[in-house]
Image (tube, rainbow, N blue to C red):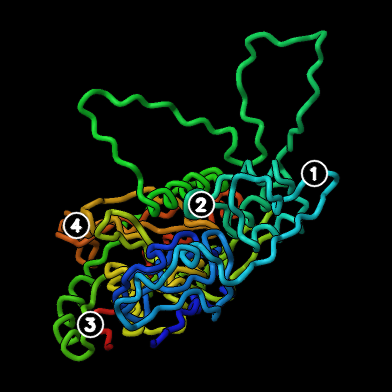
């Protein structure tokens, strides 16, 4: 009988472990090659792991909510058929490797996040952060998680800790019998920065369709709510004349496609200008942690990409300042294709320092984008339109047709003032308008 060991693969540069969140296949089930076998969660991303062999699942070494290290054998698949009957009932539920329980530490007499009495699941990394920062169980339970099924992730902990010092943690007060409160309103006394937000209760009318959000839509919703509550948003607008860029692209796009095998879209050209402007205004390329500003050395440009499902994901072009226009074009096309084909790796969506979203793709003239935390700014690219414009010449002014677009720059007013935010987007427009129509690539 041939048996194949299924190991937990590496799922990112800094990922060393993952939590088993759901077994898609049970002991005794047939499994096809590359068929989804198990769902796992890290503090960065949730994944379905495909089977590396076809056969029968005969052993599972980890069960739901247990943590496996990268390289651990998590299951065994028999490649010989007809073995379903040989798998007895006890083996179906047996855990082959015993994971030691996490013993919670005590903080000021209050259980921390590792408490086994909590109804919520917390990864070992989240537990260790909670223990280190003296976050008790009640405080941890009050946080709104952005992970699968609302789980608290490492990023949730980092975001919470950044504002924790400014939050008054309410502790339960003893009830005084002599002064009862009658008909007191119910108040959320949780300590999370979103804990006092109360969503309206919406009643469906007859004939309305009820659609449950999928996992990605829930993550996006939580991330957007968190962003607008963490960062005071301001948006500056600039109109740019991109006639030279449109004419140049029309002239070279066919030869570029033939030589490089890639379509030359406007997005790489815009990203090149944005990278130049970031070099001129490096304080746009920062993050905020509490009262500390982290000035990023690398320029990693995230590009918001719409998926066929209607959801949104932001793959990242790493070290964009070290790439020429050809290199940026290839990265943009490859990441966009991988996003549409659901082939992005966890590291492909990590490490962004500035984000671009192209609302013009959908015919929108401009937009007010929400900052992709923990960044402090995001630029929306509007649709390119032919418009009448005043053209100045030595012989006088006249009206002509020009290709123009709006740039909408949203930024975190905690650290980016109107002068910096406005000058930055104006500089991007300057680089676009000064584009060399004789540029060689």
Task: State whether residue 174 is above or below residue 432.
Answer: above
Image quadrant in which you'd find residue 263: bottom left
Q: Earlier in the sequence, mark 2 or mark 4?
A: 2
Viewer-nearest residue: 80 or 410? 80
* Residue linked to disc 4: 385
Residue drawn at (38%, 65%), measured in percent from left and top? 25
Q: CA distance from mark 4 to mark 3?
A: 25 Å
At a point 37% along the width and 61% down the height, the residue shown is: 313
Q: Are marks 1 and 2 in contact (CB under 8 Å)?
A: no
Q: Quadrant of the N terminus?
A: bottom left
Sequence-wise first label, 1 or 4: 1
**Apparent side of residue 202 relative to residue 182 in the rendered image (left or right):** left
Q: Label 1, label 3: how many angstroms apart (C-alpha)?
A: 59 Å
Q: Quadrant of the C terminus?
A: bottom left
Q: Tag 3, which secondary structure?
A: loop
Q: Which residue is mark 3?
A: 262
Between residue 432 and residue 30, name the one nearer to us: 30
């Amino acid at each position: 009988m041939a048996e194949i060991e299924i190991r937990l693969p590496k799922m990112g540069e800094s990922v060393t472990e993952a939590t088993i969140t759901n077994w898609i296949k049970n002991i005794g089930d047939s499994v096809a090659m590359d068929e989804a076998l198990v769902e796992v969660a890290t503090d960065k991303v949730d994944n379905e792991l495909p089977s590396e062999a076809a056969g029968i699942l005969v052993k599972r070494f980890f069960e739901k909510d247990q943590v496996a290290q990268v390289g651990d054998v998590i299951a065994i698949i028999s490649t010989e058929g007809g073995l379903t009957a040989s798998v007895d009932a006890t083996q179906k539920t047996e855990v082959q490797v015993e994971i030691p329980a996490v013993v919670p530490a005590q903080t000021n007499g209050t259980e921390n996040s590792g408490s086994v009495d909590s109804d919520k699941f917390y990864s070992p990394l989240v537990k260790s952060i909670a223990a280190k920062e003296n976050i008790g169980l009640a405080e941890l339970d009050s946080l709104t998680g952005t992970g699968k099924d609302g789980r608290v992730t490492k990023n949730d902990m980092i975001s919470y800790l950044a504002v924790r010092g400014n939050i008054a943690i309410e502790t339960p007060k003893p009830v005084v019998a002599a002064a009862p409160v009658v008909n007191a309103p119910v108040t959320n006394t949780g300590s999370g920065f979103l804990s006092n937000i109360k969503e309206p209760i919406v009643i469906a009318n007859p004939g309305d369709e009820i659609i449950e959000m999928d996992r990605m839509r829930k993550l996006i919703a939580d991330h957007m709510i968190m962003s607008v509550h963490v960062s005071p948003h301001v948006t500056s607008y600039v109109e740019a004349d991109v006639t030279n860029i449109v004419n140049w692209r029309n002239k070279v796009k066919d030869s570029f496609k033939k030589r490089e095998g890639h379509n030359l879209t406007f997005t790489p050209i815009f990203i090149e200008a944005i990278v130049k402007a970031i070099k001129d205004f490096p304080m746009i390329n920062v993050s905020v942690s509490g009262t500390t500003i982290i000035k990023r050395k690398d320029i990693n440009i995230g590009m918001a990409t719409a998926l066929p499902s209607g959801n949104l994901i932001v793959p990242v072009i790493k070290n964009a300042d070290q790439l020429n226009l050809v290199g940026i074009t290839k990265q943009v096309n490859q990441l966009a294709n991988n996003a549409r084909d659901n082939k992005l790796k966890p590291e492909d969506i990590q490490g962004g320092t500035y984000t671009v979203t192209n609302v013009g793709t959908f015919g929108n003239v401009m937009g007010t984008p929400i900052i992709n935390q923990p960044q402090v700014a995001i630029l929306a690219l509007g649709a390119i339109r032919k418009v009448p414009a005043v053209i100045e010449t030595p012989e006088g002014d006249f009206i002509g047709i020009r290709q123009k677009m709006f740039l909408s720059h949203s930024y975190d007013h905690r650290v980016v003032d109107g002068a910096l935010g406005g000058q930055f987007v104006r500089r991007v427009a300057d680089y676009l308008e000064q584009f060399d129509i004789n540029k060689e690539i």
